Image: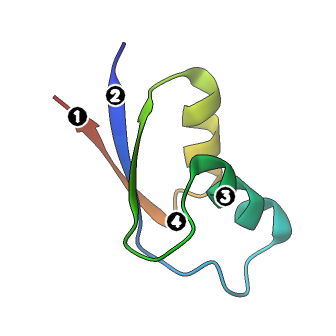
Amino acid sequence: MKKIRVKQVKSQIRRPKNQKLTLVALGLRKMNQVVEHDATPSIIGMVNTVKHLVSVEEVK
């Protein structure tokens, strides 16, 4: 299965609660924090919810 690397690049301050909770569910709590996940449909959906707050790259 593919892996993706997700990095939080913008703050969650003044964002709707669902976006804050999505970042926590992805494991992102601080700016510039990086986490790796399998590219499952649920993870891709969460990333799409906060795509303006994170950067995503595929791990090779």
CA separation in Å, label 1 and label 3:
21 Å
> Does label 1 or label 2 sit earlier along the sequence?
2
Q: Mark 1 points at which residue?
A: 59
Q: In what element is the residue under mark 3?
A: helix
Q: Mark 4 points at which residue?
A: 52
* Kind of residue sitting beneath label 2: Lys
Q: Where is residue 16 in the image (x, y as percent from the top left)?
A: 80, 72
Q: What element carries label 4?
A: loop
Q: Residue at label 3?
A: 24
Query: What is the three-letter code of the residue carrying label 4?
Result: His
- Going 48% across and 78% down the picture, which residue do you hit? 10
Give the residue type at disc 3. Answer: Val
* Distance Cα–Cα, label 2 vs label 4: 20 Å
Dots 1, 2 in contact, CB < 8 A: yes
Q: Is residue 1 above or below residue 13?
A: above
Q: Nearer the viewer, mark 1 or mark 3?
A: 3
| Neighbourhood count class around disc 1 (C-alpha, 10 Å): few under 14, some 14–19, many 20 upward | few
| Quadrant into which the N terminus falls | top left
Q: For mark 2, what is the residue?
A: 3
Position of the C terminus, as image quadrant, is: top left
Q: In this view, does 43 lie to the left or right of 24?
A: left
Q: How far apart are marks 2 and 3 (CA)?
A: 19 Å
Q: Residues within 10 Å of mark 2 (few under 14, many from 20)?
A: some
Tell me if 9 is positioned left or right of 60 in this view: right
Instruction: Give the image location of residue 43, x and y in percent.
Output: 58, 34
